[in-house]
Image (spheres, rainbow, N blue to C red):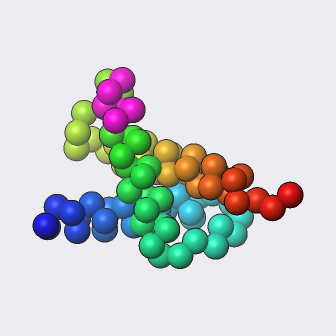
Amino acid sequence: MLSFLWTLLIGFVIGLVARAIKPGNDKLSLLWTMILGVGGSLLAKYVGQGLGWYQEGEAAGFIASVLFAIVLLAIYVAVRKKP
């Protein structure tokens, strides 16, 4: 149970950092910010570690998580954009 809460907390921080780095007003709720961060972390884990870019526990994992969260945020904004 504690690891699940830790994952949500770290995901929230990653989501906040991703939203701060990406320019523009994204208008995401706190829940969606957390989901964004957790999604970026999961992508970074499976892609980054799968390709051997870094090992678990390295700082590169946090950086990759933020980068993947920014990519997810850009996809979200592109899909949500009204024509």
Position of residue 20 in the picture relative to residue 83 (left or right):
left
The question of residue 49 being in magenta is answered with yes
Q: Quadrant of residue 26?
A: bottom right
What's the residue at 58%, 71% (across, down)?
A: 28
Residue nearer the viewer, 10 or 59: 10
Percent x, y for residue 73?
Answer: 59, 55
Indicate the quadrant where residue 53 lies: top left
What residue is at 70 percent from the left and 60 percent from the top? Answer: 80
How many numbered marks, from 0 up? Answer: 0
Span colored in magenta: 46-51
Q: Vertical placement of 31 versus 80: above or below?
A: below
Residue sticking out furthest to the right? 83
Q: Considering the whole magenta stretch, tell me its main secondary structure.
A: helix
Q: Is residue 76 above or below residue 55?
A: below
Quadrant showing the N terminus:
bottom left
Please give left or right for residue 34 compared with residue 3 in the image.
right
Residue farthest along the bottom direction in this orientation: 29
Q: Is residue 72 magenta?
A: no
> In the image, what residue occupies the spot 23% across and 39% down?
56
Residue 25 x/y as whole percent? 69, 69
